[in-house]
Image (tube, rainbow, N blue to C red):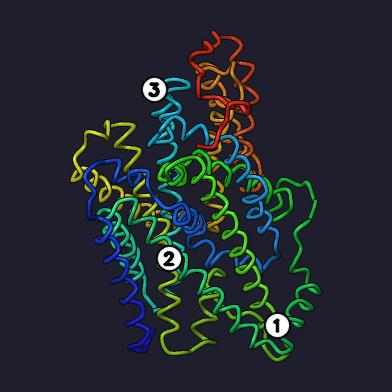
């Protein structure tokens, strides 16, 4: 970031994002406008926003790192999105959520079980959201630190600056601004990886043929290591567990994603958004893994000397851009891509946290817009605080996310599946199941060497295994109490 062109590109991008926030703030008069865009959002924009939010800065730094230093096993997790997660959402979760007309996904817990369960759901979501956003801000800050040569104090202020900027345009524009800026940021993210991929493969002697030959020789395309050892990271089974018990609950029980389904006019549009997300996420995930494989080939071709010495392996792709692609404006574009990734995370999480507090704790439909915006600013400060705590954990960003998601959303997924698939399930069973899941996960965390990618499974499955039989110890819900709350395939209709 030495030339004026780089700074012009970067500052121009930030200015465009702010203009979008102000533009979409027009006409917002109610909390429904602010949190679900009046339920009138375009399904394509919602689908792209889902992709941008879920990928965030993990995709920009962690996926190429996994492919370059490891193999393609993590891609199995992302393939769960089109193969498993989207069908489950299509047939089970989205029709129920839309039929109930929810604004907060945790309203379901109050209707199906009890108000206290709803409050617990919001607390678990807050734990997940703050940990998730804080990790993303920290990961992006590491890359910016390397790109700009920041010292420790400047690095801290960069984290503060990232959080404050995303909070500002989220507070001004609400969910409509969040979704449309996510579309812009997805374009920047996707365009950035294509540019890096094409440039890098052009620098490999032998082109694509050499990339695939070297990758196959070094086992870089492995995806089916069937070792059942739960302590090993990056096997086929652990990648499946990460997809089913960390990513699936992220798409089904997190306010961040569910809020987007609720922004569309109906079930049909929400399903179209799901398909859009699945297609875009799959294509872009493959591109990022290809980029990592190309970087491996570039640094291991004859005369290259191997990977550069880096403070963090996550810095590999940004390092390549800055060191090997010194074109005017390109560093600014890469830094804009990093900001695009992390801001897609922060804006979505902050708006969703505000919606949860407003609707689940403060009866949000009666709150003035000024209060909603103040809540947004308060959560922005919490995200900055979380980002400053993350370095103390000393783990890889994907592992941190896996632990946080397992502790929070993994437990919630078990409760939601009980509520939707088991008519006999009741609040007593749900509470006992939650206790079992929390206890099991605590034991796994403190007393075993089980890999973090399995944590969601050890949270979710005990909830169901204990909660369902325990429900038979208490009174069964009346049939009229379950109307619209449980899955009935004969009744589901596209509206």
Q: Is residue 408 above or below residue 463?
A: below
Q: Give whichever of 350, 70 is nearer the camera.
A: 350
Decide: marks 2, 1 in contact (CB < 8 A)?
Answer: no
Picture residue at 77% right of the left edge, 78% below the top: 214
Q: Give whichever of 408, 472 is nearer the camera.
A: 472
Q: CA distance from mark 2 to mark 1?
A: 32 Å
Helix, strand or loop for disc 2 = helix
Alpha-carbon neighbours of circle 2 within 10 Å: few (<14), some, or many (≥20)?
many
Q: Nearer the viewer, mark 1 or mark 3?
A: 3
The dot on residue 381 is none
User: Which quarter of the picture shows residue 68?
Assistant: bottom right
User: Which quarter of the picture shows residue 162?
Assistant: bottom left
Pointer 3 residue: 115
Q: Which of disc 1 and disc 2 is earlier in sequence?
A: 2
Picture residue at 75% right of the left edge, 59% below the top: 223
Tell me residue 275's x, y (percent): 57, 51
Q: Which of disc 3 and disc 2 is earlier in sequence?
A: 3
Q: Is residue 202 visible?
A: yes
Q: Is residue 116 above or below residue 26?
A: above
Decide: marks 2, 3 in contact (CB < 8 A)?
Answer: no
Q: CA distance from mark 2 to mark 3?
A: 37 Å
Q: Which quarter shows the N terminus?
A: bottom left
Pointer 2 residue: 185
Picture residue at 54% right of the left edge, 27% below the top: 434
The dot on residue 300 is 1
User: Which quarter of the picture shows residue 324?
Assistant: bottom right
Q: Which of disc 3 and disc 1 is earlier in sequence?
A: 3
Tell me residue 125's x, y (percent): 43, 39
Q: Is residue 415 above or below residue 323?
A: above
């Amino acid at each position: 970031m030495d030339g004026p062109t780089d700074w012009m590109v970067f500052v121009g991008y930030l200015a465009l994002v702010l203009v979008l926030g102000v533009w979409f703030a027009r006409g917002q008069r109610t909390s429904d406008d602010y949190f679900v865009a009046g339920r009138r959002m375009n399904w394509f924009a919602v689908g792209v926003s889902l992709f941008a939010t879920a990928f965030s800065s993990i995709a920009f730094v962690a996926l190429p790192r996994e492919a370059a230093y490891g193999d393609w096993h993590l891609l199995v997790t992302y393939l769960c999105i089109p193969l498993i997660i989207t069908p489950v959402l299509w047939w089970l979760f989205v029709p129920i959520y839309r039929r109930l007309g929810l604004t907060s996904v945790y309203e379901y817990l109050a209707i199906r079980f009890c108000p206290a369960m709803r409050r617990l759901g919001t607390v678990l979501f807050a734990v997940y959201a703050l940990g998730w956003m804080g990790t993303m801000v920290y990961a992006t800050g590491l890359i910016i630190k390397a790109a700009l040569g920041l010292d420790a104090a400047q690095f801290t202020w960069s984290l503060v600056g990232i959080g404050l900027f995303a909070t500002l345009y989220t507070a001004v524009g609400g969910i409509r601004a969040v979704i449309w800026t996510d579309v812009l940021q997805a374009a920047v993210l996707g365009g950035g990886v294509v540019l890096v991929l094409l440039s890098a493969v052009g620098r490999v002697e032998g082109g694509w043929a050499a990339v695939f030959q070297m990758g196959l020789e070094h086992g870089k395309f492995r995806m089916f290591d069937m070792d059942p050892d739960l302590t090993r990271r990056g096997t086929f089974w652990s990648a499946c567990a990460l997809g089913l018990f960390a990513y699936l609950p992220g798409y089904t029980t997190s306010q961040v994603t569910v809020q987007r389904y609720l922004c569309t006019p109906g079930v049909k549009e929400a399903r179209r958004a799901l398909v859009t997300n699945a297609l875009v996420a799959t294509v872009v995930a493959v591109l990022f893994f290809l980029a990592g494989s190309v970087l491996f080939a570039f640094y291991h071709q004859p005369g290259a000397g191997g990977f550069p010495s880096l403070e963090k392996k996550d810095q590999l792709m940004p390092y390549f851009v800055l060191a090997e692609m010194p074109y005017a404006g390109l560093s600014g574009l890469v830094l804009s891509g990093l900001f695009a990734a992390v801001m897609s995370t922060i804006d979505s999480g902050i708006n969703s946290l505000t919606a949860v507090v407003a609707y689940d704790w403060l009866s949000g439909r009666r709150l003035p817009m000024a209060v909603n915006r103040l809540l947004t600013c308060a959560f922005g400060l919490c995200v900055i605080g979380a980002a400053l705590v993350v370095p103390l954990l000393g783990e890889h960003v994907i592992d941190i996310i896996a632990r946080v998601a397992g502790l929070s959303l993994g437990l919630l997924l078990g409760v939601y599946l009980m509520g939707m698939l088991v008519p006999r399930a009741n609040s007593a069973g749900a509470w006992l199941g939650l206790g079992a899941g929390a206890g099991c996960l605590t034991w796994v965390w403190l007393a075993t060497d089980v890999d973090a990618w399995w944590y969601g499974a050890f949270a979710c499955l005990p909830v169901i295994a204990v909660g369902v039989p325990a429900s038979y110890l208490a009174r069964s819900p009346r049939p009229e109490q379950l109307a619209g709350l449980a899955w009935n395939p004969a009744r589901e209709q596209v509206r």
